Amino acid sequence: MSDTVAGVGRKTGRQERILDAALALLSQHGISGVSMRAVAREAEVSLGLVNYHYDGKVTLISAALRRVEEHDVAMVTPDPARSAEDNLRAALRRVADAEFLTTEYLSLRLQLWALAQAHPDFEEINTTAQKRYRKGLATLIRAARPELSSAETTKRATDIDVVQNGMWLTALLGIDRAAIRRSVRRCEEIAFG
């Protein structure tokens, strides 16, 4: 299992290894490649331990999705040591970090988006995660541009999220780094413009 996919979480303890394994299998094989047995094998733990922590596949995948959600929200959590403008720029640039532009990580993102169609629990988690990310981004925009209304910052956060998701999707096609940089600059224009 690569550190890139595991990078959406932490590498501590058996329960974390189980979630890392679930995310790696999702990235590599999609939902059909995730079974309790396969996760146990990937995490190098007993099947009983996986079953102890998670009631079933839906519970396990839900926990993995929530882990990704927390990672996404952390990307838009302001650093009190930075100015509002620097926090916003850092968040906008973070999505173009090399760790997120790998085929493995981008494949995971595609699988997570597809999961929203596979089960109502996954759809709810995905919707909640997207709302939390956009709210965090809107909060960063509002802090950097206090003259903007709440409705305007929400609109800008939504537009940025769409551009960022499109950037990730097209990165799978091997789009060049210059195009990624232009996308980040476009997000900055939306946020600060």
Image (cartoon, grey):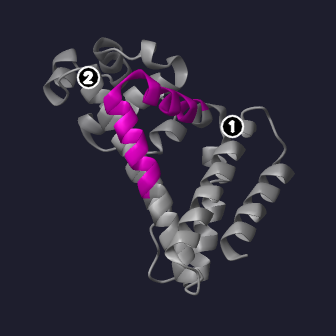
Question: Can residue 17 be seen in the rendering of this structure?
Answer: no
**Residue annotated with mark 2:** 45
Examine the rendered structure and indicate whether residue 44 appears above or below residue 153: above
Examine the rendered structure and indicate whether residue 29 appears above or below residue 81: above
Of helix, strand and loop, which one carries label 1?
helix
Q: Over which residues does the magenta segment extend?
A: 107-132
Name the quadrant containing residue 97.
bottom right
**Residue annotated with mark 1:** 169
Examine the rendered structure and indicate whether residue 121 appears above or below residue 144: above
Q: Is residue 49 left or right of residue 74?
A: left
Question: Can residue 167 be seen in the rendering of this structure?
Answer: yes
Q: Nearer the viewer, residue 135 or 77?
A: 135
Q: Nearer the viewer, residue 72 or 39?
A: 72
Q: Is residue 178 left or right of residue 106?
A: right
Task: Give amino acid for label 1.
Answer: Leu
Task: Give amino acid for label 2.
Answer: Val
Whether 121 is among the magenta residues is yes
Principal secondary structure, stretch drawn in magenta: helix
Residue 123 rendering spot, x and y as whole percentages: 39, 34
